[in-house]
Image: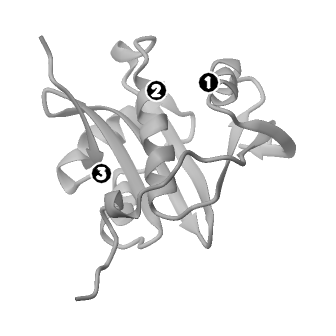
């Protein structure tokens, strides 16, 4: 039986995450972008779901003031339909709550009904759209999650504690 774990993305995950990204999106982020997210972007947090230590799903968020803006979520193609997308997204939402965020936003392709259904299931609501957002052709639906779960700051892995 496989061991499934969830944790923050590390440099060891970058190659696998970039490969999942490239296989999932028409205009994928580069491996270098994910490297910079881990090493240079103080606002970025990425949650990775690992099977036997190998990244098979991830979710990214940028923290801006009290908002968590979801950057990307993807599951390795051979692991889709197994609930891993929901699992990694729920973990990311809890991380946002633990880190003091009050709400979350995202954009999703208007044609990506499966993703919209997941976001609705998790409590996101439709709040607007961005015309020709994707490659200047497809509109993006803007969604927001106004009610995050109870947060526990002690679980925030990036919290700086002063003695």
- Give the secondary structure at mark 3: strand
- Label 1 SS: helix
Asked if the residue at tag 2 contacts the one at tag 3, i.e. Cβ–Cβ closer than 8 Å, the answer is no
Q: Quadrant location of residue 101? A: bottom right
Q: Which mark is residue 8?
A: 3
Viewer-nearest residue: 25 or 51: 51
Q: Horizontal placement of 29 versus 138: left or right?
A: left
Q: Does label 3 or label 2 sit earlier along the sequence?
A: 3
Q: CA distance from mark 3 to mark 2?
A: 15 Å
- Quarter-wise, where is residue 78 in the image? top left
Report the residue marked by disc 1.
118
Name the residue rendered at 63%, 25% in the picture.
115
**Residue 62, x across and y down, in percent:** 53, 61
Disc 1 and disc 2 in contact, CB within 8 angstroms: yes
Label 3 Cα neighbours within 10 Å, binned few <14 / some 14-19 / many ≥20: some
Q: Which quarter of the figure is the N terminus placed in?
A: top left
x and y percent of residue 45 in the render? 41, 58
Q: Relative to 72, say whether 69 is above or below.
A: below
| Near-viewer residue (144 or 113) | 144
User: Relative to residue 74, is residue 38 drawn left or right?
Assistant: left
User: Dot 2, crowdedness within 10 Å: few (<14), some or many (≥20)?
Assistant: many
């Amino acid at each position: 039986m496989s061991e499934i774990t969830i944790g923050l993305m590390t440099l060891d995950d970058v190659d696998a995450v970039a490969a999942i990204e490239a296989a999932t999106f028409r205009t994928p982020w580069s491996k270098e972008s994910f490297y910079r997210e881990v090493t240079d972007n103080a606002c970025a947090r990425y949650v990775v779901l690992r099977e036997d230590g190998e990244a098979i799903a991830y979710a990214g968020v940028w923290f801006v003031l009290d908002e968590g803006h979801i950057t990307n979520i993807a599951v390795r193609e051979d692991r889709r339909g197994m609930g891993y997308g929901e699992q990694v997204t729920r973990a990311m939402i809890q991380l946002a709550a633990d880190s003091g965020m009050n709400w979350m936003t995202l954009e999703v392709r208007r044609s990506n009904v499966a993703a919209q259904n997941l976001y609705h299931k998790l409590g996101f609501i439709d709040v607007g759209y961005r015309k020709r957002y994707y490659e200047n052709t497809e509109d993006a639906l803007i969604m927001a999650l106004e009610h995050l779960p109870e947060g526990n700051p002690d679980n925030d892995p990036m919290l700086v504690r002063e003695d």
